[in-house]
Structures are given as C-alpha cells and as structure tokens.
Image: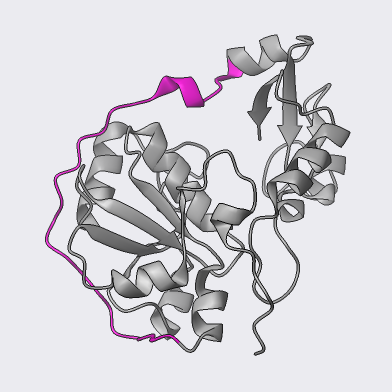
Amino acid sequence: MTLPAITPPDQRGYADASIFVTTEWLAEHLDDSAVRIVDTNYPREYEKAHIPGAVGVVDNYYKTSLEDRTHIQGPDQFAATMSSLGISNETSVVAVDSHGGLYSLRLLWSLHYYGHINLKILDGGMPKWTAENRPVTADPVSYPPGAFTPRENREIIALKEDVLAAIDDRDTVILDVRSDGERDGSNKRGGKRGGFIPNSVHLEWVNFHTDGEVPTIKHADELRNMLAEVGVTPDKNVITY
C-alpha cells in the first residue's frame, strides 16, 4: 500500500489535539508500562494480527452483555472489565481499531463517562500502522488485573428525559449520526421501531473521517463547515445518537 500524505493531528486545527497519538509516538512507547494499548476490533481481527502488547476485547465490551446491547455496563461491571484489561486509574489508554475510529472512540467515551480522562486514540489506526510496515503479532496478550475505580460523569450523557426536553428546545441540536437506512426506518438494526427523533438533524458518522485505505478524522475546518450545514454550531447544546 502506498501511504497517502496525512496531515499530523496537531496541524488539523482541532481545539484539543492531545487525544491523538501518532504511529511514531506509539512505536516509541510499546514497552511503556504506564501505557495500555487496547485493540477494539472484533476478536477475529485481533486474533489475526494486532500491535505487540495490545490487549483484545470481546464484542461490545462496554455494554451490559452480548445479549443486552442497550446500556453501558454498570460501575462494578465496567470496573471489572477494565481491570481485566490491566487498566488502572493511572493508566494511559491508547485505543486502536481498523474502522476510522468507530470502536476506539466508543471505548474512550465509556472511559470518560466513568471518570478516566487519560485517553488517546491512534491516528490512522491499524491501517496506518500496517501501511508503515510496523510490527504486528498474533500472540494473545494479558496483564495483571488493574485497580480501576469508576467515577460516573453524568454531564456527558443524556437520559430519556433530557432528550424529550430537547426536542422543542431551540438552543439544543439532536444529532443523528446513524446510517440513512436507520434514519428512514428501513434498517431497524434489531429494534422494535424505525425512524428518528423528531426535530433531530442527520449526519452519518462516516462523514467525519477521510476516505481511502487509511481514514483519519477530517480537518477541523471541514468538520465545522459540515456540522454548521445541519445546524450544529458552537452556540448550541448538542446531543448525539
């Protein structure tokens, strides 16, 4: 694969680029005991190849179970999950995936919800890592249990009551990032009803990253313009779903 020119995260105009790490940075920290690399791909992808030292996760690891995919794990269950990955409160977590950040950012949000803010995402993910011919392995990895104490951050989650109140609130934008099929009800994804929340705006999540074999999050100017077109501006409260 010929690697396309990729603007470094700290040159894309983000308000805070510290959430990103580059492949160069990660290569220098593979043996850093304070860093835990978490491969958030599906197990079959992890078993095929992953970054040395990266721990793998089970499908929908942040949800209650493989059967109950509606809610995030409760505090005790989430703490046990993080502990099993060798993550403590002091651990710097670097999430990696092969899908433009789709699964990595879910892990980061879940950790943030439970008060863990020492979070990073590998810019370009596994596609960039492998395109640069960096080392991979198929060997499973495990670590001693970590000491993870959850501290719920209710400020970053909207409950049903919050969403209902936001429907007719001109100061709040409800942003639907699902696919077109989910939006129009043709793809219910196992749910009982299709369609969308009244007065919500739509911008599918795939629009937030670049095209090509090594997708990255788009430049800040592109994101701002794209969001402004659907009414998501800095003066608004935003609820995503």
Q: Say which residue appears at 28% left-offset and 41% top-offset.
A: 77
Residue 68 appears in the picture as rendered? yes
- Image quadrant for the C terminus? top right
Q: Vertically, is 115 above or below 212?
A: above
Residue drawn at x 70%, y 57% as measured from the top left: 209
- In the image, residue 56 sits, relative to residue 134, either above or below, namely above
Q: Residue at x 33, y 44 (%)?
A: 118
Say if the magenta span includes residue 25.
no
Instruction: Decide if residue 212 is on the left or right side of residue 19.
Output: right
x, y percent for residue 148: 20, 42
Q: How many marks?
A: 0
Q: Is residue 178 visible?
A: no
Q: Quadrant of the N terminus?
A: bottom right
Span shown in magenta = 134-160
Q: Coloring scheme of the render?
A: one colour
In the foreground, 24 or 147: 24
Residue 225 locus on image (x, y percent): 82, 40
| Main SS of residues in magenta | loop
> Of 219 and 73, which appears nearest the observer?
219
Q: Residue at x 39, y 80 (%)?
A: 47
Q: Where does the image place residue 217, in percent across and percent down from the top left?
A: 64, 56
